[in-house]
Amino acid sequence: MKRVKALVLTGYGLNCDYETHYCLESAGADCERVHINEVLNRSKEM
């Protein structure tokens, strides 16, 4: 079965990103933490 890909946003005012990352990986997702500015500046594709 193919693993689900998940993107966890990080940055000021965004809380629990480490906990969310841990939970998603524990559930079997391929997870990556990315700062919100990387998404807004389009330096990181979703």
Image (cartoon, grey):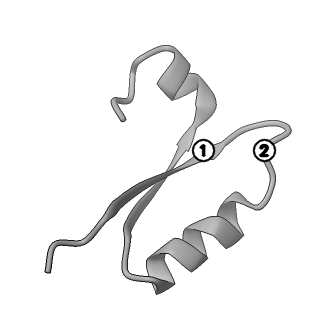
- Which of the 4 image quarters holds residue 1? bottom left
Amino acid type, label 2: Leu
Whichever of callouts 1 and 2 sits on the residue coming sooner in the sequence is 1
Q: Which mark is residue 19?
A: none
Within-10-Å neighbours for mark 2: few <14, some 14–19, many 20+: few
Q: Nearer the viewer, residue 35 or 25?
A: 25
Q: Are marks 1 and 2 in contact (CB under 8 Å)?
A: yes
**Image label count:** 2
Assign a secondary structure to mark 2.
loop
Assign a secondary structure to mark 1.
strand
Residue 19: image location, x then y, percent: 69, 71
Which residue shows up at 61% across the image and 31% down it? 36
Amino acid type, label 1: Leu
Which residue shows up at 77% across the image and 61% down it? 16
Residue 12: image location, x then y, percent: 81, 36
Which residue shows up at 81% across the image and 53% down it? 15
Residue 26: image location, x then y, percent: 49, 85
Residue 41: image location, x then y, percent: 49, 14
- Which of the 4 image quarters holds residue 6? bottom left
Q: Furthest residue to the bottom?
A: 26
Q: CA distance from mark 1 to mark 2?
A: 7 Å
Q: Which residue has dot 2 on it?
A: 14
Side of 39 relative to 5 (left or right)? right
Quarter of the C terminus within the rendering: top left
Side of 25 relative to 19 (left or right)? left
Side of 11 relative to 34 (left or right)? right
Which residue shows up at 42% across the image and 63% down it? 31
Give the answer, above or below, for where 1 lies relative to 11.
below
Q: Nearer the viewer, residue 37 or 46?
A: 46
Q: Which residue has dot 1 on it?
A: 9
